[in-house]
Amino acid sequence: MNAADPPGTNASRFVEAGLTLIPGAGLLAPWVQPIAEKIALEVARSRSECLRLVVQETNMSREDIEANLDQNPQLLTLTNRVLWAAGHSGQDRVLRILAGFLADAIRQPSLADEVTALMGSLESLSEHHIRVLELCSTPAPDAAANEPNPLARYWNEKQILEHAGFRSELVAVALRGLAGAGLLDDRKNDTWDSVLTPMFQVTEMGNAVLDALRKVTPAD
């Protein structure tokens, strides 16, 4: 930003760039150009929808948000990262989660460090991850309300495969991704047989992700 630029110019230009940036700039073969344009439009749509949800959730005007970003360089960096993730995801429920966490940080800049730390987990989310996470947040199908062993209320991989509704390979990838991101905790259950069976429990961070999804309403 130049010394002559008025306050807010940096954030304003940044938000505008978040809506219009086209990845992979450069000379393209004529047959590639229409495909690149479609990709660029979808990236812009995702970033625009993420920003719309942020404005909705903060209950702040876009101008106030830009002023807040201009005064907090860390928030500007975080917003850049969120918009990058939004543009490369395009999945509506992932956009809602990203927007929910960014809105929290914009409302309370003191949360910027916490949200930045979470971004490593959020950037890798897909619809399959979310569906498995939601499934594991409910009691396992055969769990009794008065079951003394708390692990019996958690889901095992076989139960998840039966109820997730997608291929076993995708379930395995989702479980590994969620556990690696700290959103699921796999506990070993040796109560019923000699083979230790992993039982999956949603972590505190996983519940925070689901809370963000619930509180950010879908697009009209």
Image (cartoon, rainbow, N blue to C red):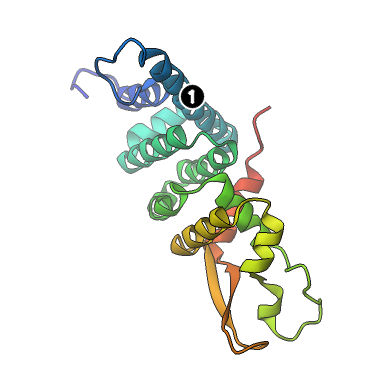
Local crowd at mark 1 within 10 Å, few (<14), some, or many (≥20)? some
> Which residue is tagged 1?
42
For image coordinates 66% across by 79% down, the residue present is: 151
Viewer-nearest residue: 109 or 42: 42
Compared across the picture, whether 22 is left or right of 87 comes to left
Compared across the picture, whether 16 is left or right of 5 comes to right
In the image, farthest residue toward the right: 145
Q: Secondary structure at mark 1?
A: helix
**Residue 6 position (above or below residue 59):** above
Where is residue 26 shown, x and y percent of the image?
25, 18
Quadrant where the C terminus is found in the figure: top right
The residue under label 1 is which amino acid type? Glu
Quadrant where the N terminus is found in the figure: top left
**Residue 112 position (above or below residue 53):** below
Compared across the picture, whether 107 is left or right of 192 comes to left
Compared across the picture, whether 172 is left or right of 40 comes to right
Where is residue 20 shown, x and y percent of the image?
39, 20
> Which of the 4 quarters of the picture holds residue 37?
top left
> Which of the 4 quarters of the picture holds residue 186?
bottom right
